[in-house]
Image: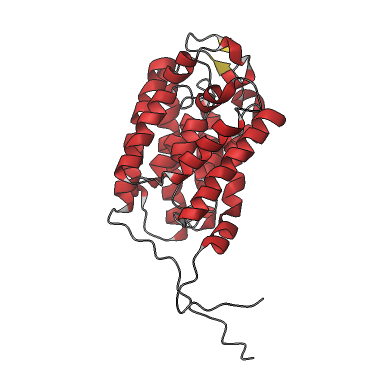
Amino acid sequence: MNSKARLRVSSGPHIRSKESISNIMYSVVLALLPATLAAVYYFGIQALILIITCSVTAIITEWCFQKARGIPATIIDGSALLTGLLLALTLPPQLPIWMAILGSIIAIALGKQVFGGLGYNFFNPALVGRAFLLASFPVAMTTWKMVDVTSSATPLGGDPNMIAIKDLFLGRVAGSLGETSAAAIILGGLYLLYKGYIDWRIPVGYLGTVALLTTFVGKGGPIFHLLAGGLMLGAFFMATDMVTTPVTKKGRWIFGIGCGILLVIIRVYGGLPEGVLYSILLMNMFVPIIDKYTLPRAFGEVKING
């Protein structure tokens, strides 16, 4: 066999969009505006400072890495801003600023730039930043403030029977900046669905699986589990990331359902009350396999043995 003949050209998925990257990114940022405003309304200046800190740090970190690599800076495309904003919305409102800065640096550096930048990362960058902070500073990341600035457990960490569904829906509960108001997240998610920027199969598969399974297992019932924690934020804004999710319709169903199954396992049987972070990151790992077995064989494709 000729050792030089190793390059094989096969037909593959060529994803095209009439929208530019910047249009999509800033549209997602716009969709997060209701959740951002809700966070500032309920948690005040602390929330605003965290959001600005994470966003600015993410942009600066991306610029520094691109300059160091000698490639054109693309910070105006909105992807770094979106990463910083998403990370901020996963953080507790009283988190020290220096931790937020560190998390944003990790999100861009290890979650994105180390793989080559936008479009090459395997994991959602914002979740990489949150995972790092949760592993490094578990106490700070799991200490919450109610909207009246009193310490409290999150709904998932407390008694479901003591939490009113209305409070979960509107946001008058303890939690991270972007996970308290399900209404604000749903509003932004519906906007993205309307614009066609996310595939409905992933959030429907994710939320539907959680609703079905929690009908039979766990405390609180399906409505509680759907509205509590970061599920809505994860289902509409993180599990739907175009770069880290499958490219096929069947694959997206598998991805969403897999996220839902993992979430319920972690919430009901695991040692942590919340599992959105790990459910999405774990399914991100399986995306290449999902794509491999769900991509249709196109005419002219070359099958490589071994």
105 sits left or right of 193 in the view = right
Residue name at image x 35 percent, y 27 percent: 34
Residue 233: in sight, yes or no? Answer: yes
User: Quarter-wise, where is residue 213 in the image?
Assistant: top right
Compared with 95, 79 (above or below) is: below
Residue sitting nearer the eye, 271 or 132:
271
User: Quarter-wise, where is residue 306 in the image?
Assistant: bottom right
Indicate the quadrant containing the N terminus: top left, top right, bottom left or bottom right.
bottom right
Residue 10 lies, in percent from the top left, at 48, 76
82 sits left or right of 123 in the view = left
Number of numbered discs on residues: 0
Residue 299 lies, in percent from the top left, at 45, 77
Compared with 186, 123 (above or below) is: below
Residue name at image x 35 percent, y 35 percent: 190
Residue name at image x 55 percent, y 26 percent: 222
Compared with 176, 236 (above or below) is: below
Q: How is the image coloured?
A: secondary structure
Residue sitting nearer the eye, 97 or 92:
92
Residue 111: in sight, yes or no? Answer: no
Residue 75 lies, in percent from the top left, at 36, 48
Residue name at image x 42 percent, y 29 percent: 51
Residue 266 lies, in percent from the top left, at 66, 33
